[in-house]
Image: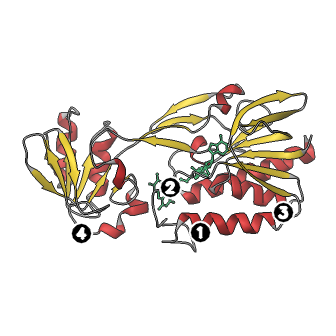
Amino acid sequence: MQNDVVIIGGAFAGLAAATYLARARRRVCVIDSGRPRNRFTEASHGFLGSDGSDPSSILAKARDQLVAYPGATLVSGEAVAARAVGDGFVVSLSSGAEISARKVILAFGLRDSLEPIPGLWERWGKTVLHCPYCHGFEFSDQPLGVLARTPMSMHQACLIAEWGPTTLFLNSVELEPEHAEMLASHGVAIERGKVTRLTGEGHGLSAVELEDGRKSQVSALYVAPQSSLASPIAAQLGATIDDGPMGPIIRTGGDKMTTVPGLYAAGDIARAPHSVSWAVADGVTAGTAVHRALVFG
Ligand SMILES: Cc1cc2nc3c(=O)[nH]c(=O)nc-3n(C[C@H](O)[C@H](O)[C@H](O)COP(=O)(O)OP(=O)(O)OC[C@H]3O[C@@H](n4cnc5c(N)ncnc54)[C@H](O)[C@@H]3O)c2cc1C
């Protein structure tokens, strides 16, 4: 095998795992296609010591620090397939190259899809947001909106109301009586009409427009995106994938090993909820677990 470990996905989870493995003097190769999930935002919040930093600068620093270790290699490219071979794995890249390793850590993240409402996608990560802990404080006390998609959106609206006066846009989602009571008790206003588009200067948001022509003023709109795994490689290798509240979750144990021996998964693809801090923590768990498996396995 060329490497002890190949990591597919080199953002928060993947680089954290690789850093621990490189520090354990292992040969670790990280393959990354350069499209982290939060690339749509200019400021990542809540990660200790980097609160408010551009996520691309956090990752650039982590990459520089990783490649300073002699055992670490970074490959820019896309892994398109993987197969088990003997006691290890071979990963194929879109370039046609193949990279082998004794263990594989999947850290390829999720892809989000949003409702096809004009003005929604271009504001994603700026004024159309998914998480108030990441992007709530910046809109404190301003009029906020929540676009309903699932029953969980009702809970999301009650939470968002902690940051500012909140309107829930039902946009064709049914409202159960118990949810109506809960929303009222948190002071959430309800708009029942279908949302037709979002308006505002540039990436700014000033209003949500409804089917009947009315405009509801909001400065930020929170949505629950539909997420999917960014790569089919977990399924190709036979890993069990569960349905989570926000989309698929690759099943792992406490050590982040999947249901396939020698195959690990870390970050958004193997947990809920999601954040940079959680992804980094998962990467550390997977990296140290893989190291112990290499030593004792
Ligand atoms: C708009 C938005 C804003 C956010 N803001 C915050 C915030 O402020 N604070 C916070 O804590 N969290 C925030 N998050 C959540 C955060 O982005 C994720 O929790 C975090 O990025 C997960 O890290 P990860 O390493 O698991 O996956 P990702 O960061 O998504 O990285 C996956 C990496 O794998 C690569 N990859 C994918 N497929 C392949 C392949 N086949 N071959 C090679 N490489 C591949 C991708 O290019 C990418 O570089 C935000 C999320 C979104 C969507």
**Mark-to-mark CA distance, 4 and 3:** 45 Å
Question: Is the residue at mark 2 in contact range of ligand 1, meaning its CB lies under 8 Å from it?
Answer: yes
For marks 4 and 3, the one nearer the N-term is 3
Q: Which residue is mark 3?
A: 23
Dot 4 or dot 2, earlier in sequence: 2
Comparing 104 with 141, the one in front is 104
Q: Secondary structure at mark 1?
A: helix
State whether label 3 is within 8 Å of ligand 1: no
Q: Residue at x 45, y 39 (%)?
A: 246
CB atoms of marks 1 and 2 within 8 Å: no
Front position among marks 3 and 2: 2
N-term mark: 3 or 2: 3
Residue 240, image quadrant: top right
Q: Residue flagged by tag 4: what amino acid is it?
A: Asp
Q: Badges 4 and 2: C-beta atoms under 8 Å apart?
A: no
Q: Amino acid at mark 2?
A: Asn
Q: Residues within 10 Å of mark 3 (few under 14, many from 20)?
A: some
Disc ID at residue 38: 2
> Which quadrant of the figure has residue 218?
bottom left
- Pointer 1 residue: 57
Q: Earlier in the sequence, mark 1 or mark 3?
A: 3
**Nearest to N terminus: mark 1 or mark 4:** 1
Mark 4 Cα shell of 10 Å, populated few (<14), some (14-19), many (≥20): some
Farthest residue toward the bottom?
49
Classify the position of the C terminus by image quarter. Answer: top right
- Asked where in the image residue 83 lies, by quadrant, the reply is top right
**CA–CA distance in space, label 1 to label 2:** 12 Å
The secondary element bearing badge 3 is classed as: helix
Percent x, y of residue 168: 21, 48
Residue 227 rendering spot, x and y as whole percentages: 47, 39
